[in-house]
Image (tube, rainbow, N blue to C red):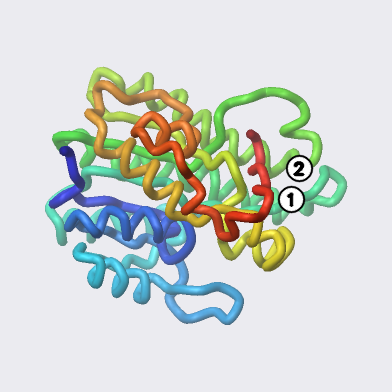
């Protein structure tokens, strides 16, 4: 069976949540995992730092590398990529997980919030991919995976929070364009999105607290789906917009109850699904 043993993963926003879950799943195979995120000092509102994440990666069996990387700043991206290559010799997989959430209607969206979510979600994804691509082109099974929704231009996905929707679908459009642009090079580019809400700090802090989190699934469902995608042969798996449930069912996993925070609670559907 294919594994991620010895592979080097560059994961943005991996100090907590879905990014950390993907990092730990890869670490269990003995992968090299770069935690590229901006949280260096503990924050009482948010669990985890790049250093605590690396500790967990190492304990799980991987080799972790903490890189301070705010994807709004190109020089930080390129510095983290250079340090990764110097440490591990290359990059096999990029996971564009870093993302900013801001849910508001048009008249309630300040320019600085619009700029923030686009700088992180779209520009950060594009620039991180750009910096990693020369190294991915040298890998034996290179993948880019964006945590982005399936492309859908129905108005109902835009009207409630236009600025945020534009930024997340911008990440999806990066998949659409780069998958075709780098198809002949054999670099797989795909998107992955959860069908239900996932229990992350964003849910607890911004979308309803512990009661909302009780109706979520754990980040591990996304991590297991990501693992299945990233171990697939790159030339047979590109340009897809995957949902976590569908990926796992294709792997023969039909009972997903173990991923629920509370198996008795009705699950919240996620945005854009």
* Residue 50 % position (x, y): 38, 70
Using a 10 Å C-alpha cutoff, classify the residue at mark 2 as few (fewer than 14 neighbours), some (14 to 19) or many (20 or more).
some
**Along the viewing direction, whichever of 218 and 237 lies nearer the viewer:** 218
Q: Quadrant of the N terminus?
A: top left
- Apparent side of residue 152 relative to residue 9 in the rendered image (left or right): right
Q: Quadrant of the C terminus?
A: top right
Furthest residue in direction right, as rendered: 107
Q: From where the camera sits, is residue 79 visible?
A: no
Q: Are marks 2 and 1 in contact (CB under 8 Å)?
A: yes
Measure the alpha-carbon separation of dots 2 and 1. Answer: 5 Å
Report how many numbered discs are placed on residues in the image. 2
- Apparent side of residue 182 relative to residue 139 in the rendered image (left or right): right
**The residue tagged with tag 1: helix, strand or loop?**
loop
* Residue 237 % position (x, y): 32, 25
Q: Residue at x 40, y 60 (%)?
A: 20
- Apparent side of residue 36 relative to residue 117 in the rendered image (left or right): left
Q: Residue at x 54, y 42 (%)?
A: 194
Q: Above or below — where is 182 with respect to 158?
A: above
Q: Residue 204 lies in what quarter of the image?
A: bottom right
Q: Above or below — where is 233 with respect to 30?
A: above
**Along the viewing direction, whichever of 209 and 253 lies nearer the viewer:** 253
* Residue 242 % position (x, y): 46, 31
Question: Which mark is first along the chain, 1 or 2?
Answer: 1
Q: Above or below — where is 127 with respect to 36?
A: above
**The residue tagged with tag 2: helix, strand or loop?**
loop
Q: From where the camera sits, is residue 109 visible?
A: yes
* Residue 42 % position (x, y): 49, 81
Q: Can you identify the residue that label 2 sits on? A: 161
- Apparent side of residue 100 relative to residue 181 in the rendered image (left or right): right
Q: Can you identify the residue that label 1 sits on? A: 103
């Amino acid at each position: 069976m294919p594994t991620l043993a010895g592979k080097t993963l560059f994961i943005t926003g991996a100090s907590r949540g879905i990014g950390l879950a993907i990092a730990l799943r890869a670490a269990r195979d003995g992968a090299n995992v770069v935690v590229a995120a901006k949280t260096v000092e503990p924050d009482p509102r948010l669990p985890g730092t790049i250093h605590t994440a690396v500790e967990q990666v190492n304990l799980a069996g991987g080799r972790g590398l903490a890189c301070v990387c705010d994807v709004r700043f190109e020089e930080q991206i390129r510095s983290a990529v250079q340090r990764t290559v110097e440490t591990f010799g290359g990059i096999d997989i990029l996971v564009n997980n870093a993302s900013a959430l801001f849910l508001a209607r048009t008249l309630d969206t300040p320019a600085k919030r619009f700029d923030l979510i686009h700088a992180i979600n779209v520009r950060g994804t594009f620039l991180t991919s750009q910096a990693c691509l020369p190294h991915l082109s040298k890998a034996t099974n290179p993948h880019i995976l964006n945590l982005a929704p399936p492309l859908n231009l129905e108005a109902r996905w835009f009207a409630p929070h236009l600025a945020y929707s534009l930024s997340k679908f911008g990440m999806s459009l990066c998949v659409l364009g780069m998958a075709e642009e780098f198809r002949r090079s054999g670099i797989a580019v795909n998107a992955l999105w959860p069908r239900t809400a996932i229990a992350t700090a964003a849910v607890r802090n911004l979308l309803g607290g512990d009661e909302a989190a009780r109706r979520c699934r754990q980040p591990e469902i996304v991590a297991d789906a990501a693992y299945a995608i990233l171990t697939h042969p790159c030339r047979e798996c590109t340009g897809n917009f995957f949902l976590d449930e569908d990926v796992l069912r294709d792997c023969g996993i039909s009972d997903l109850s173990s991923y629920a925070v509370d198996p008795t609670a009705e699950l919240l559907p996620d945005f854009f699904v």
